[in-house]
Image (tube, rainbow, N blue to C red):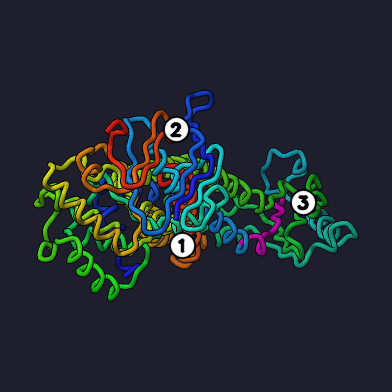
């Protein structure tokens, strides 16, 4: 589903590369934790998958497409196959929960009847049924993240990227979010989650990919957060 | 859904930057009014040319009893001198361009003068002897008036030769200068309009960074993301153009037709028809302005 072949990303000419010859293969339906200290290249990895950046060297394949040769007018099509969740939720404060999720469908031109049936479904999946009319400001952090996940997942993308989705949440709430992500993963969605949360990584026992200084230093199935444990 | 969604996005954008929107409307209004004024001045000129150039006459004023011109040294024009002028007009040089020649006697000139300036107090001071007898020459080709004028000028018994076209040319010169002035002001204002629309689109894009960021992430097309901003600029500019058309129409109806047309009846003035004929041009310029501004701004601020 996602394949990196010797990918190097250098932001400024002469600077240390943010990603250094990374080779990685993520299969369809996998759940992968991306761990490493700040500045280790996790965000760069996600940005390359989203084609927000282009690789300086090497090849990136996402959903069967080589992103280096993908023309820019096809980028929106690529992004429709990737849901994205962030640490800071990125919800629209003036819109209700329903409208926030519907927004993702409206802007890609889905018809009204499709939106009216799909959005309640996905809100049910993330456990927000009955809160459609609330504004993000009236929700707890965990609930806001569920809205964000609903928005990322409403179009049923084959890939879900999560950039520290539990970074702003307390442990109990985080656990709820992880259960939700796990459930989404079981529907066949490939999930790649960058995180600092060692407890969660240790509990979930999924594949762990560790980056350090831009290099891939560990790729372990059913792994834990720290390599020394 | 799409259309409705885009319309609501535009509404939000216009309201969020209301003061900027209003300033865009006003600047395009003023600049397009100048553009329109320049256009109307040119139309006025061509209208006057159409009406007058065909009727241009060369007036050969014959010597009255008292005149300081050297060609009038022998006093009032004699029958012989008049016959000589007439035959020169029929000669090979001027002949082909002369259509008809009318003789206007002093008495006739006096009568038409009194007719024209009937209500002016100074008209009563003028006597028959103050008037010139003249030959009024109608031309076959009004643009060749100079040939005819040259043939008769300087002959004995001819005081002056006046071609009306020279008078008109001065009027046209003034109107052309006014067109240049209006055009120059329009150019400056149009530049200001482009800069202002650019700034407005940029502000609008910045204030909606969150929305556009999400739109990019969920895979909205670039066109779909940029369309509301483009339309915002286009709508504001078009409203400005509409105001400019309304302003020009008001000016033409009230100032030109009512006031000028009421006092100066011998000039054909531009009217509402001319305003309507330049209206599409003004709207076109407005949309062009908005399009230029959008292209300059959006590629930078709503990049995929």
Q: Is residue B226 left or right of residue A166?
A: right
Q: Nearer the viewer, residue B300 or B220?
A: B220
Whether residue B124 is visible here, answered yes or no, is: no
For mark 3, give the secondary structure: helix
Whether marks 3 and 2 lie on the same chain = no
Residue B139: % across, % down: 74, 63
Tag 1 near tag 2, CB within 8 Å: no
Report helix, strand or loop for mark 1. helix
Name the outermost residue toward the front: A229
Residue B99 position, x and y percent, is 77, 67
Same chain under badges 1 and 3? The reply is yes
Q: Residue furthest right?
A: B92
First along the sequence among labels 1 and 3: 3
Which is more toward the observer, B111 or A165? A165
Which label sits in the foreground, 1 or 2? 2
Distance (Cα) linking label 3 and label 2 = 91 Å
Density class for disc 3 (Cα within 10 Å; few <14, some 14-19, many ≥20) is: some
Question: Is A59 in front, or is A228?
Answer: A228
The label shown at residue B279 is: 1
Is residue B53 within the magenta segment?
Answer: yes
- At label 1, counting other C-alpha atoms closer than 10 Å, the crowd grade (few under 14, some 14-19, many 20 or more) is many
Residue at image position (21%, 45%) is A203
Residue pointed to by mark 2 = A215
Is the residue under label 2 in contact with that under label 3 (CB below 8 Å)?
A: no
- Give the residue furthest to the bottom: A113
Of residues B99 and B173, the one drawn nearer to the viewer in this rendering:
B173
**Marked residue chain, label 2:** A
Chain bearing tag 1 is B
Q: Quadrant of the C terminus of chain A?
A: top left
Give the magenta part as a residue range: B52-62
Q: Can you identify the residue that label 3 sits on?
A: B146
């Amino acid at each position: 589903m996602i394949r990196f072949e010797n990918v190097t990303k250098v932001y400024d000419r002469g600077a240390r590369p943010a990603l250094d010859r990374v080779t990685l293969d993520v299969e369809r339906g996998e759940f992968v934790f991306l761990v490493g200290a700040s500045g280790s290249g996790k965000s760069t990895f996600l940005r390359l998958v989203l084609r927000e950046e282009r690789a300086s060297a090497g090849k990136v394949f996402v959903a069967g497409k080589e992103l280096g040769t993908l023309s820019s007018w096809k980028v929106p099509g690529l992004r429709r196959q990737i849901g994205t969740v962030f640490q800071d939720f990125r919800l629209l404060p003036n819109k209700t929960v329903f409208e926030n999720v519907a927004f993702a469908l409206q802007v890609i031109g889905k018809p009204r009847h499709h939106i009216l049936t799909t959005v309640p479904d996905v809100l049910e999946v993330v456990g927000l049924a009955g809160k459609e009319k609330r504004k993000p400001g009236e929700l707890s952090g965990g609930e806001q993240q569920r809205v964000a996940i609903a928005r990322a997942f409403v179009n049923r993308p084959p890939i879900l990227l999560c950039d520290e989705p539990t970074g702003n949440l307390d442990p109990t709430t985080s656990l709820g979010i992880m259960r939700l992500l796990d459930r989404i993963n079981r529907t066949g969605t490939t999930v790649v989650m960058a995180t600092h949360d060692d407890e969660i990584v240790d509990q979930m026992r999924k594949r762990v990919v560790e980056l350090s200084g831009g290099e891939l230093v560990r790729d372990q199935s059913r792994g834990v957060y720290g390599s020394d444990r | 859904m799409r259309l409705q969604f885009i319309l609501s996005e535009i509404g939000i954008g216009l309201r969020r930057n209301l003061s900027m929107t209003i300033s865009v409307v006003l600047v395009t209004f003023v600049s397009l009014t100048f553009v329109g004024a320049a256009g109307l001045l040119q139309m006025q000129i061509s209208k006057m040319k159409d009406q007058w150039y065909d009727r241009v006459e060369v007036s050969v004023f014959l010597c009255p009893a008292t005149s300081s011109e050297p060609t009038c040294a022998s006093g009032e024009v004699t029958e012989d001198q008049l016959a000589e002028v007439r035959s020169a007009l029929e000669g090979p040089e001027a002949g082909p361009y002369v259509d008809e020649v009318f003789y206007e006697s002093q008495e006739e000139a006096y009568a038409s003068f009194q007719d024209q300036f009937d209500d002016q107090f100074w008209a009563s001071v003028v006597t028959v002897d103050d008037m010139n007898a003249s030959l009024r020459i109608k031309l076959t080709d009004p643009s060749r008036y100079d040939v005819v004028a040259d043939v008769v000028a300087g002959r004995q018994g001819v005081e002056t030769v006046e071609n009306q076209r020279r008078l008109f040319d001065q009027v046209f010169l003034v109107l052309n200068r006014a067109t240049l002035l209006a055009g120059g002001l329009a150019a400056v204002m149009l530049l200001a309009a482009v800069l202002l629309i650019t700034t407005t689109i940029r502000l609008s894009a910045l204030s909606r960074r969150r929305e556009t960021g999400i739109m990019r992430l969920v895979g909205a097309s670039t066109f779909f993301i940029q369309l509301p901003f483009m339309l915002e600029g286009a709508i504001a500019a078009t409203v400005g153009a509409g105001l400019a058309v309304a302003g020009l129409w008001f000016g033409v109806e009230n100032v030109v037709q009512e006031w000028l047309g009421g006092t100066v009846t011998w000039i054909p003035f531009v009217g509402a028809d001319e305003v309507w004929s330049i209206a599409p041009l003004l709207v076109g310029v407005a949309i062009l302005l908005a399009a230029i501004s959008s292209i300059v701004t959006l590629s930078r601020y709503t990049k995929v």
